[in-house]
Amino acid sequence: MEMSDQIITKLLIVSITPYFLEKSNFWFEKNLNKILQTQKTQTFWEDNTIFLEKNQSCNFSQFLRKLDEMGYEKVIRVSEPGEFSRRGGIIEVFPINLNYPIRFDFYGNLIENIERLPIEIKDEKTVKEILKKRLKSQKIFSDLKGLKPGDYLVHLDHGVGKFIGLTKEKPLNQKMSDRTLSYYQIAYAQGDRLYVPFGLERKLSRYIGFVEPKISRLSSPFWQKTKRKIKEEAEKLAKELLEIYAKREIAQRPPCFPDSEIDAKLAGTFLFEETPDQVQTMKEIEQDLKKLEPMDRIVCGDVGFGKTEIALRTMVKKVNSGYQTAMICPTTILANQHYHNFKKRLKQFPIRIELLCRLQPKTGQKKIIQNLKRGQIDMVIGTHRLLSSDVEFKNLGLLVIDDEQRFGVNQKEKLKKLRTSLDVLSLSATPIPRTLYLALSSLKEISLIQTPPLGRLAIKTFILPWSETVIKKAIWAEISRGGQVYFLYNRVETIETAKKFLEGLTSGFRPEVKLGIAHGRLKEKELVKVMADFQNRKIDVLVATTIIENGLDLPNVNTLIVADSTRLGLAEAYQIRGRIGRSHIQSFAYFLYPHTKRGQIAEGDKINEVSPRYGVEVNGSHLSEKAEMRLDALKEAEELGSGYKIALKDLEIRGAGNILGKEQSGNINQVGLNLYCQILSEAIEKLKRS
């Protein structure tokens, strides 16, 4: 590069690639002639560098496109390396191979002037590290797997467009051959088209927000203004979030002891072979526990994929290191099940474990609370009772939150406040959007368990209009092979009617089908007894509300029939489907939709069969578009290990929800969840450095 004071006569601009980010700026100056020679013969150097001189003829629009394809981000005003902007015939660029930005003055397609701008980066090494992190961050938020024509994409520089398909085009400034490159073709308003080359996927992300986002023209300044406004608001939010999490980052606690003999013995009592994802998750947790900073990790895995085993082993590790541990569950039934399972697994170990819930006698609760305070209990499993003001721990070191989406932020924060150095492990099959966001934006670590256990079969899913014949055949098929059935009917007021209807439908079966009822208004003792009878096979068909959603593990139940699937959210339906298929036996889920105006079992226990597909009346109107989308998405997610995708799809269908409060939901819908998370993540990183 040649220059005199601020005026520059010639310079090189290079792409934002990992290879170039490893090189110093001096290296580019020193090797400029070699680079220009190599540029003529090697496609990598031709595609990833551009050499410009004052008074050179250079196609203005092609130069802008080249900067885009070289990975530079378009902004309103340049301030950091890797950015460019355009105002009329002026283009400003901050090359990653220089410590300062450059201004180009064009007259038509002629470069009239090249000038250095009065900004200078002192710490070149730090800047390169930041850019490397940004590249990784962009890849994380991109996720273009399974992209289909018609899907909405967000381009970092141009905004929301509609993916048309893949195409092949000649690259810009072709010198050497007649080669073509593959591009993503994206449609914008009024016939505008954008071609994004393969290899630059990090500039693209799926749009998750409104079902029909607003699409503008490519040349419109609207997107840059929107992005700048959201970046400013993301920085404000980042400050608030960092203040919330600052105590946890500053807090320190002694690292856990390395693997002990007890850890090895406990692993030996596991009846199944660990999946690769389980092994990897345990390694990640072990690394967390070795650090001085407290752990805050969410384990996201499909129902039945072994999250509870991870929780048990983590709790034992903390107990071995001298701490008490607590597991909080959303229901008494689930807490009871975990308690008995854990007690059975730990019977040969010197670990004191107790159950705490409102179902127990007052005197028993009081004794457990006293023993927790004295440190005479190592492990406690409980419900919301653990959050009561009279519950105190002597040395609580780990909180496990089962079924993450069932707990509010305030409830979780209450337990965290017991000790600022508390390790937290959350378990979820479908993380609530806020947790998913926190995981993606670096404030919470996430482990994905997506590998099904050996021998596990995907649940066969059917979405059908209400049919007595379908219900009768489904129940008979399951009972005749010695299995049990869940019949989901989510109206407590008429659940007895539903039971009578099924009794009539199965009256001719031999042996006789035994039915039971479970719902949240039953007294807890009654509910626990019903579930125990079902578990002990004294009941064949359980007519239940969504109370069965909460994590029960009954391998003999392998048919689910949902009376009115239109009333369920996608994540809820997915979670309920996960109550079956817990073994190597093929399981079946029937999601039925009704045609009666009341959307429930009719008077006289009789319902007529209806015509197929979704054009049916529910509550006096046609099935809503969102309900249809939920059912379609559930069918699409039939394969094992799709809980993480379900969480994203659910978020998409609900218009991004209320992730960070009403103030942020509008911003998310403007740029899409993925790009918003990326912007927020970068804002957090920026504040951490300052």
Image (spheres, rainbow, N blue to C red):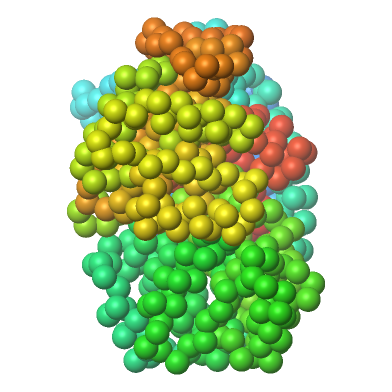
In the picture provided, is 551 more to the left or to the right than 381? left
In terms of image quadrants, where is residue 251? bottom right
In the picture provided, is 152 more to the left or to the right than 682? left
In the picture provided, is 373 more to the left or to the right than 73? right
User: What quarter of the picture does the C terminus occupy?
Assistant: bottom right
Q: Residue at x 34, y 39 (%)?
A: 513
In terms of image quadrants, where is residue 38? top left
Q: Residue at x 57, y 55 (%)?
A: 526
Residue 447 or residue 575, whichever sits in front:
575
Q: Position of residue 552 (x, y in %)?
A: 45, 55
Q: Residue at x 46, y 51 (%)?
A: 429
Rendered view: 321 above or below 266:
below
In the picture provided, is 424 more to the left or to the right than 309? right
Q: Position of residue 481 (x, y in %)?
A: 20, 42
Q: Is residue 342 visible?
A: yes
Residue 291 or residue 178, whichever sits in front:
291
Q: Residue at x 52, y 66 (%)?
A: 336
Q: Position of residue 470 (x, y in %)?
A: 32, 22
Q: Is residue 183 visible?
A: no
Residue 286 or residue 355, whichever sits in front:
355
Q: Position of residue 173 (x, y in %)?
A: 35, 27
